[in-house]
Image: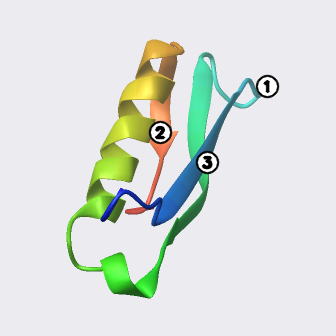
Amino acid sequence: MLDEEFVGFACAQSYRSFCYSSAQGEMTELYVEEKARRLGFASSLIALLEVKTYVSRCQKYKGANE
């Protein structure tokens, strides 16, 4: 939030595939409004998704760097 206003969102999913022995996590969407960019919001959202997918027992996470 910036000035009591939501400025972005991120979505992720966890899934099982016959290609992998454990659950996988994948970031599917990330958006931060222009006025809030370069302030660390995207990095914070990505970090939160990584934690949440790990807690969901995902052994691998496909995020912004892949």
Closer to the camera: disc 2 or disc 3?
A: 3
Q: Closer to the N terminus: mark 1 or mark 2?
A: 1
Residue holding disc 3: 11
At horizontal 54% and vertical 15% (from top left) the residue drawn is: 56
Q: Position of residue 9 (x, y in %)?
A: 54, 56
Q: Crowding near pointer 3: few (<14 within 10 Å), some, many (20+)?
A: few
Residue holding disc 1: 18
Q: Is residue 57 above or below residue 6?
A: above
Q: Are marks 1 and 2 in contact (CB under 8 Å)?
A: no
In terms of image quadrants, where is residue 2? bottom left
Give the distance between the C-alpha atoms of the residues marked 2 and 3, in whole angstroms.
13 Å
**Does dot 1 land on a helix, a strand or a loop?**
loop
In terms of image quadrants, where is residue 36? bottom left
Closer to the camera: disc 1 or disc 2?
A: 2
**Does dot 3 land on a helix, a strand or a loop?**
strand
Q: Position of residue 52 (x, y in %)?
A: 45, 26
Q: Closer to the N terminus: mark 1 or mark 3?
A: 3
